[in-house]
Image (tube, rainbow, N blue to C red):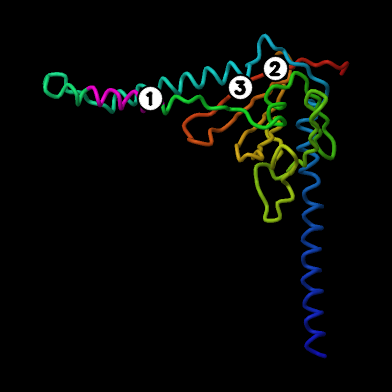
Amino acid sequence: MMEGLNILITLRRRFLVVWIFGFCFLVLSQPILAKSMESVESLSGHWQLLGKVSDDFKKSSKKLNAQIMKDRRLAASENQTFDRKKPKERNKYQAQRRATERQINDNSVNKYWGGPDEQMQILQAKEVKIHIGRKIIVLYDSSLKRLLTINPQGRAYSYSGTEVTRDMVGDSLTYASDKNLIIETSGVTGVEFSERYYLDPETQNLVQELHVEDDRSSVYSLNMVRYFTRADSR
């Protein structure tokens, strides 16, 4: 009987400690959260893409893949040595050349830098609506809606993981830094990509910086900058 009572008392103490810790965290984080929200409040609104001055996904992908192929061809040619001086080894030279050509062809398969439909909507959206409130609401092309929890601690993760938003796009950490709204996402396919939003100081247009990491190598990444003009009366 006494042993059971002691266990109950211990559990109640632990619960009380956890409750107090959680309460203190909420109270102390509220001013930080409010300040974070205030720093990106100007991003709220309805924004339309300025296509002529913005990077295009297909063109950017094609340009990056061309650069990757060029780098690989150069590396392959530098790693191969051919002996053209000995006619009796001509067959060996030809075999080396064919091996190099096969290696180049194997490495020249163009990478697809996109992903599922939801990810592509983010990368190609022609219209973005942002609402800054207790949570961040981002609407892409009036079809993909994301309700994001902003982390007042910035680019930091907790043991509980409550600062991460999980939805059809993937797992996202959202935070504010120097008047920038940043959304870092691990997509449902495992690809890491991020969005950074801020206002151009001269034009007050919305700037969207997109970054997609290469899941095969850390050497290359797709980077795009897109510009949006305000479509509401704010």
- Asked whether disc 2 touches disc 3, contact meaning CB atoms under 8 Å apart, the reply is no
Question: What crowding class fits label 2: few (fewer than 14 Cα within 10 Å), some (14-19), or many (20 or more)?
Answer: many
Q: Mark 2 or mark 1: name the one nearer the start of the chain.
A: 1
The residue that label 1 is drawn on is 104
Q: Amino acid at mark 3?
A: Met
Q: Quadrant of the N terminus?
A: bottom right
Question: What crowding class fits label 1: few (fewer than 14 Cα within 10 Å), some (14-19), or many (20 or more)?
Answer: some
Report x, y in % for residue 197.
70, 27
Boundaries of the magenta span: 94-105
- Asked whether disc 3 touches disc 1, contact meaning CB atoms under 8 Å apart, the reply is no
Relative vertical location of residue 29 with respect to residue 74 in this rendering, above or below: below
Counting the numbered discs, the total is 3
Q: Residue at x 78, y 88 (%)?
A: 3
Q: Mark 3 or mark 1: name the one nearer the start of the chain.
A: 1
Q: CA distance from mark 2 to mark 3?
A: 10 Å
- Asked whether disc 2 touches disc 1, contact meaning CB atoms under 8 Å apart, the reply is no
Q: Residue at x 60, y 29 (%)?
A: 211
Q: Residue at x 63, y 16 (%)?
A: 56
The residue that label 2 is drawn on is 227
Report x, y in % for residue 192.
60, 37
Observer-nearest residue: 85 or 234?
Answer: 85
Give the overall secondary structure of the magenta segment.
helix
Question: What crowding class fits label 3: few (fewer than 14 Cα within 10 Å), some (14-19), or many (20 or more)?
Answer: some
Q: Residue at x 54, y 18 (%)?
A: 62
Report x, y in % for residue 141.
79, 23
Observer-nearest residue: 213 or 28?
Answer: 213
The residue that label 3 is drawn on is 224
Q: Residue furthest right?
A: 233
Q: CA distance from mark 2 to mark 1?
A: 37 Å
Q: Amino acid at mark 1?
A: Ile
Location of residue 173 (image quadrant): top right
